[in-house]
Image (cartoon, rainbow, N blue to C red):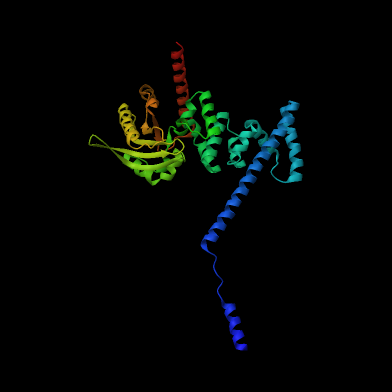
Amino acid sequence: MAKKKATRKLTRKNRAVAAPPKKLVTDLRTLIERSRTQVAATVNSALVMLYWHVGKRIREDVLVHERAEYGKEIAQTLSAQLTEEFGKGFSRASLSRMMSFAEFFPEERIVAALSQQLSWSHFIELIPLDDSLKRDFYAELCRLERWSVRTLRQKIDGLLFERTAISQKPTVVIERDLAALRDEDRLTPDLVFRDPYFLDFLGLTGTFNERDIEQAILRELESFILEMGTDFAFVARQKRITIDSEDYYLDLLFYHRRLRRLVAIDLKLGRFQAADKGQMELYLRWLETHEVCPGEDAPLGLILCADKSEEHVRLLRLDESGIRVARYLTELPPRRLLEQKLHDAVLLAQQTLDSRSQTSAD
């Protein structure tokens, strides 16, 4: 009898512990990670709003005294008191940054919306920008495309705003498009397309042909889409288009999710030619007839070339055909030179707009 009891106890002791079902572990892991993300987002939003309110409150006091020198003095005094009571994070430089934050982002509603996606580190990159439209542009695209701080910094350093078509439009148009992006998440083509495109990551130097560029783009597709914009999705390479028993081949075909449009990309090794417009128009009309799905807008065309003539682009009225022409750079020029070229391009666009307005008035 004693032996039987011992055997029974031994069996219970050696019995294997049942492993939890994989689905149970997966579900619990998802719940935990989702909760952590929500907590982090809540803390981040609260921190951003705290810094905004702190900056706003100090600015109110400074404006009452109407003395810039008073602002510096009060920031120093406040810093000492707040740091002693609440620890790091309230240095004089930090308080000054919070005051600038409240000054450059004056609307609490907009800050509250941005704080759902942007961290304080994002705002630290945005605050020093010297133009309100530029700040709004980067803030809204950062929110929309969920850029990391590093990506935001790269976009700013790469002069994304200056390269985007919207920068060459009148201020009222830029404000309207940014308002649509902020309030409706509605992108316009001018906010998507840019010039030039930086393709330095392709590693092309010396002599190369269009096929080399195409191969390199496919090899570095992730980097290429990041330069184009994260809403681009790859569809096809060397898309065959048959018209009257004649075959044509479109270099690259993408789809832009928010624009809800196909985007045809044609690569040109040399300078943009007038004949390139006709070829792209043919591609776009074929895509509109055979590939566009219900609910999608008409496809857009992007001709990427080594160089372009602004006069050709203007006279051919490419925008009316849904075609953009942009240069690509496989090696980045010095920043100062690039800034000057972009500045010249903006001036040229403004002069063109002014001349059109004058013609209409006459």
Q: Does residue 35 appear in the picture of this structure?
A: yes
Q: Is residue 316 above or below residue 97?
A: above
Residue 229 or residue 227, whichever sits in front: 229
The picture places residue 279, in percent across and down from the top left corner, at 30, 31
Q: In which quarter of the image is the C terminus?
A: top left
Q: Name the quadrant of the N terminus.
A: bottom right
Point 55% across, 70% down: residue = 18
Asked whether residue 343 appears in the rendered view, the answer is no
Position in image of residue 301 (x %, y %): 37, 33
Q: Where is residue 296 in the image (x, y as percent from the top left)?
A: 41, 35
- Hey, which residue is sitting farthest top in the picture? 362
Q: Quadrant of residue 217?
A: top left
Q: In screen coordinates, is 269 left or right of 84?
A: left
In the rendered image, residue 210, in percent from the top left (x then y), is placed at 32, 39
Image quadrant where residue 70 sits = top right
As drawn, the residue found furthest toward the left would be 245
Q: Who is closer to the viewer here, 44 or 34? A: 34
